[in-house]
Image (cartoon, rainbow, N blue to C red):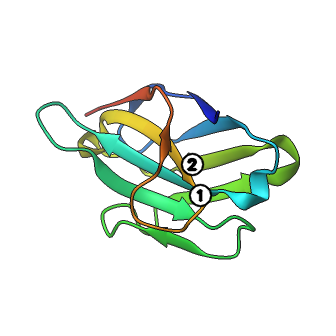
Amino acid sequence: QVQLVESGGGLVQAGGSLRLSCVASVRTFTNYNMHWFRQAPGKEREFVARISGLGSITKYADSVKGRFTISKDNARSTVYLQMNSLKPEDTAIYYCGANRVLTNTPDYWGQGTQVTVSS
């Protein structure tokens, strides 16, 4: 069973930075593609970024491109989301996801971590 635990959320002013972490309890972390999604109040969950198992391929939503960076530390079974130049519209619950086959929808999800950006 795959368990994902996010951390690093919090309250930050617009223009500030946060780094989210997600630790995966899996045997071979490089077998898993890792994703970040987010869900704002009253909105559907939306894709933010993903990274391939070996970390060689990344993809970002247009809304975060150039501001957010996804990375993996395979030795720590951890995926990160570095968020810079945060905007109030980035306020959401951020979810970590994982799958073995690289599709748009993760098979496994974490519990989420709240990010609030004040103006």
Disc number placed over residue 82 in the picture, else none: none
Compared across the picture, whether 19 is left or right of 104 comes to right
Q: Residue 8 at x, y = what percent?
A: 58, 28
Q: Amino acid at mark 1?
A: Ile
Compared across the picture, whether 1 is left or right of 94 comes to right
Q: Which image quadrant: the C terminus?
A: top left
Q: Quadrant of residue 38?
A: top left
Query: Which residue position is annotated with label 2?
Result: 81
Q: CA distance from mark 2 to mark 1?
A: 5 Å
Q: Residue 31 at x, y = what percent?
A: 73, 59
In the image, what residue occupies the spot 71% across and 67% down? 55
* Mark 2 Cα shell of 10 Å, populated few (<14), some (14-19), many (≥20): many
Q: Amino acid at mark 2?
A: Leu
The secondary element bearing badge 2 is classed as strand
Q: Is residue 62 or residue 55 the one in the foreground? A: 55
- Say above or below: 28 vs 66: above
Query: Which residue position is annotated with label 1?
Result: 70
